[in-house]
Image (tube, helix red, strand yellow):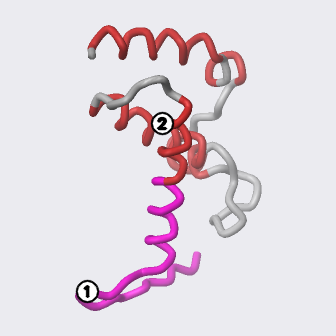
Amino acid sequence: MDINVNNTGRNEHVSAIERFIQTMKEKVQAIANELPFKTYHHRLLVKMVYNIMFWINCFPHKDNIHDAISPRIILTGLRIYHNKHCKLPHMYKYLKNITKLS
């Protein structure tokens, strides 16, 4: 396995990391715009970021170590299951609990 190390100096920017952070911010904003709240509880923001990372890591990337295996499977050995991970009522139940906390 070939590992490339990208050394950067102090106050230098790494464009790939900055692009990834911007993508994450855009995805969080997209989810936040769908929700009916004016302010967001800290825990809700953390769960939004967790949810985005969960789904990004569930699918293989073109620049990944393996073309057909997702990062989630490589690191944890766990697969996603439609009956467990892709149901909307679970999300609505979670949002009800969050609104009770606010």
Q: Nearer the viewer, residue 95 or 87?
A: 95
24 on left or right of 86: left
Q: Position of residue 43 (x, y in %)?
A: 30, 29
Assign a secondary structure to mark 1: loop
**Residue type marked 1:** Asn
Q: Residues within 10 Å of mark 2 (few under 14, many from 20)?
A: some
Residue assigned mark 2: 32
**Quadrant location, the N terminus:** bottom right
Occupied quadrant, residue 45: top left
**Quadrant location, the C terminus:** top left
Farthest residue to the left: give it.
10
Assign a secondary structure to mark 2: helix
Q: Nearer the viewer, residue 21 or 68?
A: 21
- Which residue corresponds to the image point at 48% horizontal and 62% vertical from the top-left? 22
Q: How many marks?
A: 2
| Comes first in the chain, label 1 or label 2 | 1
Q: Which of the numbered marks, if any, corresponds to residue 47? A: none
Q: Position of residue 77 (x, y in %)?
A: 57, 40
- How far apart, in angstroms, are the residues tagged by discs 1 and 2? 31 Å
Against 84, residue 39 (above or below) is below
In reply to whether residue 15 is colored magenta, the answer given is: yes
Q: Position of residue 81 (x, y in %)?
A: 68, 25
Q: Which of the numbered marks, if any, corresponds to residue 11? A: 1
Against 51, residue 83 (above or below) is above
- Which residue corresponds to the image point at 67% horizontal and 23% vertical from the top-left? 86
**Residue type marked 2:** Ala
The part of the chain drawn in magenta is 1-25
Farthest residue to the right: give it.
68
